[in-house]
Image (cartoon, rainbow, N blue to C red):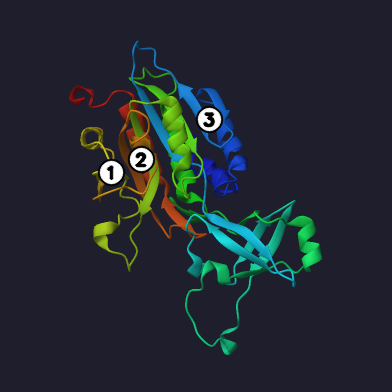
Amino acid sequence: MNVKFTLKALTGLVGVSGDEFAASNAAAELLKQYAEDVSVDAFGNVTGFVRSARENAKTLMLDAHIDRVGYIVTYIDDKGFLSVGACGSPDVKTLLAQSVTVHGKGAVCGIVSTLPPHVQKESGVPEVGDISIDIGMTKEQAEKVISLGDRVTVNSEFKELCADVVSASAVDDRSGVCAILAALDMLKGADLAYDLAVSFSAQEETGERGAKQTAFRVQPDECIAVDVSFGRTPDSNPKETAELGSGVMIGFSAALDKEMSNNLRKLAKEKQIPFTEEIMSDSTGTNADAVGVSGKGVKCCTLSFPIRYMHTPVETVNLNDIKSTAKLIAEYALGGAANDR
């Protein structure tokens, strides 16, 4: 599987939280190359299954969320300007004067309004509710093509920076979806130690809702939640970030199963897969938090990789980190470090 091509295709889809179906349907088509019984449920969750030939195999859920952050239209004023609310937690300080698309009856181009610096009385980051979007229409024109509740995304192109570093919107977490698909590609025809339940879940950014539903239905024995984490920048805390290109980040947290974390770390060392350790003292802020307490309870671990500029239109990732994550998932699904379980 071409990781860069797949990531470019996935990040080009809309799929803001609560309106994931365009992205979900496309991801389901990609998943059908590797899995059986692929479906998209009423909530927008994608599921599929890859079954082991071994009797009484445990079920390992592989989850990444398909939704992305964005905005939702909340009001159309008398002049045709739009007000919006946040879906998830997009970085509002990057929004002023951006070009956006309102996903109404068609794609409507807009500009986030801002006062010129010459006439600003004060500077600072506005609240989301104070932002207006200029679509160049009157209220009557706007209401013909836009409805309250329509989603809004900031326009961004997939960019190749240098070597294997790329930038796009929705890298969080379409790159996690890409990592799972790449792992499945590596596992084609292999003797799996687990039955795999693949989950591309909806509404992670607004409360980890979709993964909770899928875990309740599937009732896996174990789960690997694949998500992004914080990449190092000159102004970041080295204790809380990782360098792009440093490999997969194996999660350790009170919310995670320590045995799984230890086994994944051991396996990464044995197979010489680049990795770092991500220490989270309490919850993880990922779908693992919801899956772990679903039904009878599920043993969970997170696998992440660092990205820079999270929740902005220019999220930046090293493709090799996605590949390292895919490799570790594949090795675990084959029963790596099984003697310790």
* Quarter of image, res 256: top left
Q: Given the current orientation, which residue lies at the most extreme front position?
A: 295
The first of marks 2 and 1 along the sequence is: 1
Amino acid type, mark 2: Ala
**What is the spatial separation of the Cα atoms under label 2 and label 1, in whole angstroms?**
10 Å
The first of marks 2 and 3 along the sequence is: 3
Compared to residue 221, the image places residue 308 above or below, namely below
The first of marks 3 and 1 along the sequence is: 3
Amino acid type, mark 1: Gly
| SS for dot 1 | strand
Pick the residue in front: 66 or 161: 66
In this picture, residue 186 sits left or right of residue 112? left
Specify few, some or many for label 1: CA neighbours under 10 Å numbering under 14, 14-19, or 20 or more.
many
Pick the residue in front: 132 or 30: 132
* Quarter of image, res 129: bottom right
Foreground label between 2 and 1:
2
Q: Are marks 3 and 1 in contact (CB under 8 Å)?
A: no
Q: Are marks 2 and 3 in contact (CB under 8 Å)?
A: no
| SS for dot 3 | helix
